[in-house]
Amino acid sequence: MTRKGISLLGILFVFYHWAAAQPTSRHLAVEHYPFSSLSSSLNRLRHSNEDTAKVNLLLRIASIYHWNEESASADSSIEFARLAAQLSARLRYTEGHNEATFILCKSLTQKKDFRGAEQILNEVNGEQYIRLLLVLSEFYINNKDAKAGELRKAAPYLHEANRLSKALQARHWITESSIAQAKYHFRFGEINKGRDCFYQVIHFHEQIGDKAGQAHWWQDLARYLPEMNTYALQIYSYGKARKLFKEIGNIEELADCLHEEGTIHSRHKRMDLTEKLYLEELELLKSAGLEQKLFSSYQRLSAFYQKQNNQDRALQYALIGLKNLKSIKDSSQLNSLYWTAGDIYQSMGDHPASIKYYKLALSTSLWHMVRTFTLVKRVVEAEIRTGNPGGGIRFLNSFIKRRGEPATLLNRQLIVFLYGNCYIAQKDYRTAEKYYLEMIRLNGEVEPSEKFWWRNANSVSGPTAFLTIGRFYIEQGKFGQAARYVRSALTYHELPPAFEMDGRYLIYKIDSAAGNHLASMGNYQRYIFLKDSIQRVTKDEQVAVMKANFKTAQKEKDIKLLQKETVLRKRQLELKARTEKFAYAGIMILFCLSVLLYNSYRVKQKKNLLLEEQQKTIHIKNSSLLRLVDEKEWLLKEVHHRVKNNLQIVISLLNSHSAHLKEEVAANAITESRHRIQAISMLHQRIYQSENMVGIAMASYIHELVYYLDHSFNTARHILFSLDIENVELDLSQAVPIGLILNEAITNSLKYAFTDGREGEIRVVFKKTEEEKLVLCIADDGTGLPLDFDIDNIGTFGLKLIRGLTEDLDGTLTVQSEGGTTLLISFTYKWITASLPSSEDLPGFRGI
């Protein structure tokens, strides 16, 4: 074997050993543990053995110190991480060594000790090396104050991490490197480049069918996009993430997408969409039973309505959130909602309630150098507003006695400032002056020592302190003492307009008191200018909101265009990947399809010709059939018409014959026969006059028949008819018996039920009682039947006819004689209910 070959094998062996060592797929954030667990962790460390459990405990303590904001915490984090690294090396505990070097690198960059952080790279290899390269790059990328030159220091780390992750084919770190590269591009405003880095990651997860991965990176794309003409892309990305999370059933992430997208809309003044998405998130969490996440949704809605100045709804959601937290026994978030409720009550002017909730928030929150003193400030200010400055002083005394003097100069200055305000409210100006002078003394110590004092929301340093004591002296009429403090306030560079406006107004009053009218006018003009500018900015913001709403439609169009662009880009990639592979196969398939299409075209032509011939034949036959049907319908109508005419001839003959009869019995028999024939004649008349040649509408027929009988027999009498007829169609075979039964029953009632000439009523009911059953009832309130009446031994022809007709209907006949006579006939019908006019719609049959 040659020397060159041996060297090559040696290099490959070293590379393999280096590449295979220290694999890791951990993330780029230090684990976050509560600071309250530090003391218990330190106690456990004193009694722990030299094993991997001790390594993990050291790592936990290092993580707690890493997240603590105290200045010395970074050094403590580095110390414990080094101990964990050394113990891991002795135990050959690779995972522990990886985490220790990772925390070391993070804490060193936090201290801006980049040389020390880079030296850690010499202690690691493989994937852990890539991880630390990304830690170094992300320090520059995540530094919001970094200028372009400092940002570019991240580029070499990114390039090397990208190269090594591809060389090792480490999929996890290829993804992390791409995302870090995307963030780098976003910092330089290179939106398309950053977006394409994300698209590469998303496309990989799409290829392997990982919908969860696609959803995660769509969501992260929306999160990391800068607020610079990316509104449409952010909304589009959240939309893609929401769709995928919904498909895989990840309700928690779907809810996160909803409220994050709502927050994006709020930044663009689309409060309607923000409210809609926040409420949708709340309903989603409720329906999924995610009680542990509901409080965040309630708090978001409370804050949203508070910004909209809808304090009632803001308080409603805050109190519901408190109730939710208490129901799930989660006290870790109580202070946040207590604070929110305090702010709302303060906005509503209910200062006693705001004090109550601020104190509850203070009692349930962990010590924090900013949050704790923010609450203290709000409690004292609320006490002053209620007219109880003494309560504010007592609260401050109790707080300092319990917690001790503040550790930072900023917070000491805040405390003396609050004392001064309380004593002014008590009109104890001498004591107030003492505290304000102490505030000014501390101001000289704060400014050189606290570099970022102006970022603290509680800070009263700098111009705030000078304006406060200047205003105090002006109110006391001590303009000479006020002058130097107010002028000191105005010497600060880049003063916010509101600060300068107050300062100019105060110096105007000082100059006026000193008789320096020329200077006072100049300061007053500057004050007016700043005041108008602030008001104009406020109006401009309102106009901006209107413009944003006006441009919403255009932005929505941009979203749609972006969606189309993405779909097109995806299709182009797919087409490019498949073109070479399937080109020849596609040509062959096209040729075969062409042959098949031509053959099918020829076959289709022949079939079309055949179908056209058949269609013509069918059309001719259909025309003939339609003619035959029309002729048959005409003939059938003609038959019914002629039957009716013949029956009318018979009725006329009977009328003529009865005119020559002298015997009453014979005349009555002919009259009854005439009525029966008339009942049948009316049925035939209805059929040929109707378009329906199949059934007879019984409602109108019965009304017409009753009307006919009433006018035939009820001359000069006072017998009323009451009809309750349901809309039913019957076949002629059933309609004829019904008509004859009605004729016989009503005739009998008219002739025999009211013989003494008294008034009465005849009721006719024809209804459907149950499926396939009809009931016909004819009842009167006349004299009734004889006591010895027996239905089985009927003597009269009329009742025999009724009984026979009932049997023809396959029905049952019931006769009752209580308070009159009632005939009840029940039978099965053959036709369905028709849509006909009701009895109320037919005039002339109620109370004839």
Image (spheres, grey):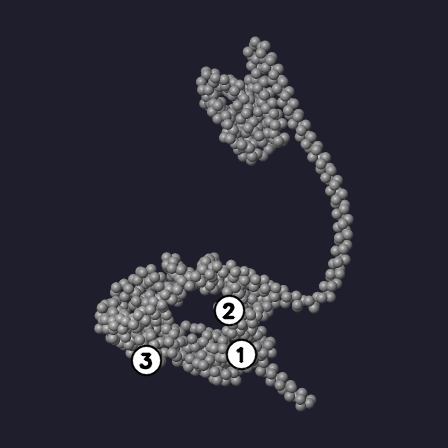
First in sequence, mark 2 or 1: give its number. 1
- Image vertical order of residue 487 relative to residue 685, above or below: below
Marks 2/1: CA distance?
A: 19 Å
Any mark on residue 155, and which?
1
Most extreme residue toward the top is 662
- Quick one: SS at disc 3? helix
- Quick one: SS at disc 2? loop
Any mark on residue 202, and which?
none
Most extreme residue toward the bottom is 3
Quadrant of the snapshot with the N terminus: bottom right
What is the x, y in percent for residue 790? Answer: 52, 20
What is the x, y in percent for residue 656? Answer: 60, 13
The residue located at (23%, 68%) in the rendering is 426
- Quick one: SS at disc 1? helix
Any mark on residue 225, and which?
2
Instruction: Give amino acid for label 2.
Output: Leu
What is the x, y in percent for residue 539? Answer: 40, 62
Residue holding disc 3? 445
Q: Based on the displayed image, in which of its 4 quarters is residue 213 positioned? A: bottom right
Q: Is residue 92 left or right of residue 453?
A: right
Marks 2/3: CA distance?
A: 41 Å
Residue nearer the viewer, 770 or 134: 134
The residue located at (63%, 64%) in the rendering is 571
* Crowd band around label 3 with a 10 angstrom C-alpha radius: few (<14), some (14–19), many (20+): some
Instruction: Give amino acid for label 1.
Output: Ala
